[in-house]
Image (spheres, helix red, strand yellow):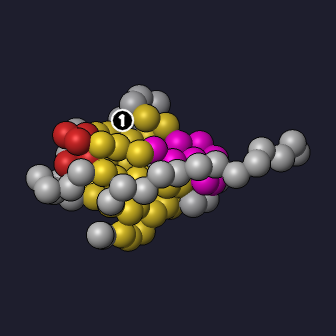
Amino acid sequence: MAKGNWTGTDASTLIVAADAYREYLVIQLTNATSVNLGIGEAAVAGDGIKLINAGDAVRLEGAQAQSAIYAIGNGAAGTYQDGNVLYVPGPQVAT
């Protein structure tokens, strides 16, 4: 299993390289700077999958998990992990 960290910029940036053998991929935002993701194509601000809050995550399977993943969001930071990882959010606390 592979894992790592990524940082977004104000331009579409490759955060996870394509891998034809990968079956699953989880991408998680670890700070409160929103980010847009591009699956197999450049990320576009305001388009595609958007992670907003620290702890937000997306789980990809099959062809999407095998694709290169791009991010755009200046200052956004996160982690990724391949393998069959199931993300389950914790309790929601009102602020």
Q: Position of residue 16 (x, y in %)?
A: 28, 58
The residue positioned farthest toward the right in the image shown: 95
Give the quadrant of residue 54.
bottom right
Frontmost residue, 53 versus 60: 60
The prevailing secondary structure element of the residues shown in magenta is: loop
Q: Position of residue 45 (x, y in %)?
A: 42, 36
Q: Position of residue 15 (x, y in %)?
A: 32, 58
Give the quadrant of residue 19.
bottom left
Frontmost residue, 9 versus 37: 37
Q: Position of residue 46 (x, y in %)?
A: 46, 31
Tell me what residue is drawn at x 39 percent, y 31 percent. 48
Tell me what residue is drawn at x 88 percent, y 45 percent. 95
Q: Which residues are magenta?
A: 51-58
Amino acid under disc 1: Val
Question: Element under label 1?
Answer: loop
Quadrant in the picture for the N terminus: bottom left
Q: How many marks?
A: 1
Residue 70 in the magenta stretch? The answer is no
Residue 49 visible to an observer of this rendering: yes
Residue 8 visible to an observer of this rendering: no
Give the side of residue 94 with respect to residue 66, left or right.
right
Tell me what residue is drawn at x 24 percent, y 51 percent. 23
Give the side of residue 71 with respect to residue 92, left or right.
left
Give the side of residue 15 with respect to residue 36, left or right.
left
Give the residue number, with chain letter if any, for mark 1: 44
The residue positioned farthest toward the left in the image shown: 20
